[in-house]
Amino acid sequence: MGKESVQDDQVMATQLANTMFNSLKGRPVQACIFQGKEPPQFVALFQPMVILKGGLSSGYKSYITEKGLTDDTYSPDSIALIRVSGTSVYNNKAVQVDAVATSLCSADCFLLQSGNTVFIWHGSSGTFEQQQWAVKIAEFLKPGSALKHAKDGTETSAFWFALGGKQNFTTKKVTQETVRDPHLYTVSIKSGKLEVSEVFNFCQDDLLTEDIMILDTHAEVFVWVGHSVDSNEKQNAFDLGQKYIEFAVALEGLSPDVPLFKVTEGNEPCFFTTYFSWNGAKAAVHGNSFQKKLSQLFGSLLHPESNDKSSHSNHDGPTQRASALAALSSAFNPSTASKEKSFSSSQGEYTQRAEALAALSSAFSSSSREKPAAPKPARSTQGSQRAAAVAALSTVLTAEQKKEQLDNAKGRLSRGSSLDSLVSDDLNPEMLALRWETLWKALSRGIL
């Protein structure tokens, strides 16, 4: 939004942005950016990025007429002074300033437009890249015009005459804002009041799908909206960001014109994820926070993924089950009676068992997607298949609990009741044989 833009135009622009955002189902990044606070990713879209005075909207014209103000809107025939600054496509800008000598700065390059002549003034501390940009912008604004170069300290009288006379100007570079550490907050409004709570030492896992989070980098503010947030809260997320900025202006010295971005879960841009050690696989997992955490802990065991079509799944069902049985057989086969195992072999067995359970889960998952067919007397129903598997797993857990009780009686440390107990490393051969026999019978009845 331009510094001289009127309220009506700002409201209309916001409404149009909301309409476009909603029409694309919230996938784009929505932003509110003010003149003078353009972020690098915004500047890079405009090459060259030229910001001129005044405006062309009917709202702006009506406003200056009502207030009796002078219309200083840029025109190709007027006298105009344009400041060229920056060193790359991410910060190169050309901004029209007041056409007086005090607007000059030795750290930058300037264009002075006067009739059919364009002066390119080189500041003593300016860069060669700025001079090149100045030439490009001169050709963009007044193609075919005569270019006259003037160095700091060698200006002609015609140059000073166009600026209303020679005056002193600054030779100092514009100080850059201090880079500060980013901060992540959870925000909500309760009883009409904004409640803010900081998340210290934040990481990607702190972005909970049920919450609205705010990432404050001091140069930018991001409002991150989770998938599971209430629809009304999603619509008001931008207003929540504005309230946070008002809050931070008073307490943290944040600029009121700081760029504000609205980012939805699953559509995070690179200039947001750069503040995290971002893992794309984590971001692709669907479900609530609990389901996502389980998926991270147990992988495809709890959330098997399949993009196959229905007919393809029907064909692959027996193959999946055969793979599951083969993996189970390999995982639970007591190949050694020794309790002393190397670290590498222990890791390998854990991997085998995880693959076995994942394959078994995938087999049942594909069964649930099969189209209903006429029942066959020789085969069990899907319900009996699952019941058999559940019964088998229940037997395994019961046997494991008994073993743990015996271990506790001997003064050994119990590893607790978890999914790891399903694949314990130190069962004796008799217990493994009992477990395998039970599983084999149940799976033979329900799957084969």
Image (spheres, rainbow, N blue to C red):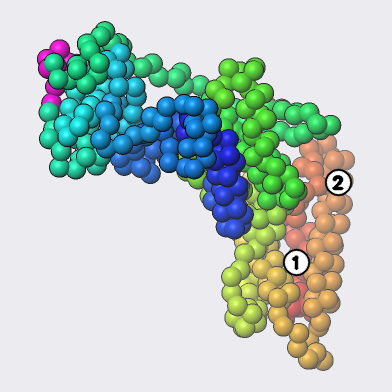
Q: Can residue 426 be seen in this view?
A: no
Determine which residue is flagged by label 2: 406
Q: Is residue 236 left or right of residue 202?
A: right
Query: Residue at horizontal 72%, vertical 83%?
Result: 371
Question: Of the residues shown, which amino acid type is indicated by label 1?
Answer: Trp
- The quadrant of the picture occupied by the C terminus is bottom right
Determine which residue is flagged by label 1: 436
Give the magenta range.
149-156
Question: Of the residues shown, which amino acid type is indicated by label 2?
Answer: Leu
Q: In this view, does 55 lie to the left or right of 162?
A: right
Query: Residue at horizontal 26%, vertical 8%?
Result: 168
**Residue neighbourhood size for the residue with mark 2, other residues' Cα within 10 Å, grouped as few (<14), some (14–19), many (≥20):** few
The alpha-carbon separation of the residues under discs 2 and 1 comes to 20 Å
Q: Indicate whether 269 appears above or below 442.
A: above
Query: Residue at the top extreme?
Result: 168
Our reading of the magenta stretch's main secondary structure is loop
Q: Is residue 303 visible?
A: yes
Under tag 1, what secondary structure?
helix
Q: Indicate whether 290 appears above or below 129.
A: below
The percent position of residue 112, horizontal first and vertical second, equals 23, 26
